[in-house]
Amino acid sequence: MSDAKARTNGDGDQQGSGVRSVRRAFDILNLLSEERPIVTLREITDATGLAKTTALRLVQTLEETGLLTPRQSGYAAGPALWRWAYLARTQWEVPQETRKIMRELADRLGETANIFVAHDLHRVCVAHEESPHPLRHVVDVGDEQPLWAGASSKILLRDAPETLLRRVALASPRGEPHLARLRDGATEAAERGYAVSSSEFDEGLTAVAVPVTGRTGRVIASLSLSGPSHRFPYEAVERFATELQQAARLISDQGFSHPLADDR
């Protein structure tokens, strides 16, 4: 093989780039969760399809860098991950004033309050305050949902260029024919000042969303209420929209900012 061609090691990784090894390392780290805080070597090989020797070498590297730590029954998150988690938390947390407004909103209206920001073809939940009802919509901070459905998506796509709308449509189950519906939904939301969705993403779920704007007046986030559809009759939707708009103005006036928010 000539020098112009990429050389590979025994695992097929390109020497000098290590891209595949990095991806494999993240595949291992992604196996950790609240439900599975410790992962065994057998679980790693079963889940990733890696050879035992390859998995063991990656695990040892992750140990050396502090990303994993050995336990009697397997491997757990290492101290480096805790340091990164602390850094991420300080960057991702929305202002306490915003959380206070959301908590009061959820308590007063009885539904879950969420803030979403757009990230490529998804919307990411960056803050939420749960409904006081036992039957409620639960979204965790960091959860991603597609931009092709939902009230918050219609808000976040208000200023989206045609190229992005087309990409979002192509990622949807309907494909390119969904483009017109996306465009119409974003336009209608802009004209009304709020958006509504019912069973677009989750069956039996209704949501009402309004824009949170930045310094330039662009939409940088959506503030929404979501819950079971039977608690969202027309009269409630109108009242929720008014309350959300008032809360969004307060949040915007406070200078809402978030690492993923785009106010360019």
Image (cartoon, rainbow, N blue to C red):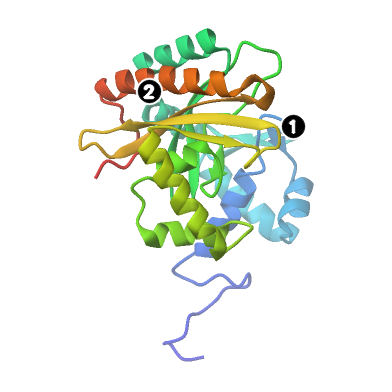
> Which residue does the image show at 54% across and 50% down from the upper left?
148
Q: Which residue carries the number 1 mark?
A: 72
Question: Taking the image as drawn, is residue 260 in sight?
Answer: no
At 61% from the left and 23% from the top, the residue drawn is 232
Residue farthest to the left, as pictured: 216
Residue that sits furthest to the front in the current view: 235
Query: Mark 2 sits on what residue?
Result: 245
Which SS class for mark 2?
helix
- Residue 210 falls in image quadrant: top left
38 over 3 or under it: above or below = above
Under mark 1, the amino acid is Gln
Q: Going 60% across and 73% down the picture, which residue do you hit?
A: 12
Nearer to us in this view, 64 or 188: 188
Q: Determine which of the numbered discs, if any, sits on residue 151 in the image.
A: none
Q: Mark 2 belongs to which amino acid?
A: Gln
**Residue 52 is drawn in which quadrant?**
bottom right
Query: Which of the two marks, 1 or 2, is nearer to us in this view?
Result: 2
Answer few, some or many: residues within 10 Å of disc 1's Cα (few below 14, many 20 plus, some between 14 and 19). Answer: few
The location of residue 66, given as percent across then percent down, is: 52, 39
